Amino acid sequence: MIENLLGNQTLEKILLSVERYGNCYACNISKTFDLSLYAVQTQLKKMELTGVLVSKLYGKVRIYEFNPRYALLKELRALLSKTLEILPEKEIKKYYMNRTRPRLQNKPL
């Protein structure tokens, strides 16, 4: 929906996921949207280098979230929030209602 503005469909999906869930990790986004893990990691690194996202390492998983110090964060989140509001219900249920978190190490299946 805003991919033309952002210039990249992968970036749109990443930012909408972070807006919806508060944070994300590359493997989950890759599986959810059936995207190349490399493409997702590239966009996440780019957003971290530009200061839009920050990351933390939890075990072996790198979790990304919005950088609270990003100057245009309020405006970006307003745009993403509005985009989530106008997405078709089918797309919201398919992509933005299935929250998964990384498993803890040594957690039984």
Image (spheres, rainbow, N blue to C red):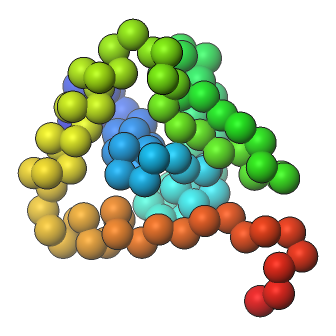
Residue, far bottom: 109
Residue, far top: 71
Left or right of 68 in this view: 16: left
What residue do we see at 84% from left, 53% from top? Answer: 59
Residue 90 in picture, x, y percent from top left = 18, 72
What residue do we see at 10% from left, 51% from top? Answer: 86
Is residue 95 shown above or below 6?
below
Residue 69 in picture, x, y percent from top left = 49, 15
Residue 11 in picture, x, y percent from top left = 42, 36
Q: Nearer the viewer, residue 70 or 44?
A: 70
The answer to whether residue 69 is seen in the rendering is yes
Q: Nearer the viewer, residue 36 or 15?
A: 15
Q: Nearer the viewer, residue 16 or 56?
A: 56
Residue, far right: 106
Left or right of 70 in this view: 84: left
Residue 77 in picture, x, y percent from top left = 29, 32
Is residue 71 shown above or below 103?
above
Is residue 17 shown above or below 69?
below
The answer to which image quadrant residue 54 occupies is: top right
Left or right of 13 in this view: 34: right
The answer to whether residue 42 is seen in the rendering is no
What residue do we see at 51% from left, 25% from top? Answer: 67
Left or right of 56 in this view: 13: left
Image quarter hosting the N terminus:
top left
Image quarter hosting the C terminus:
bottom right
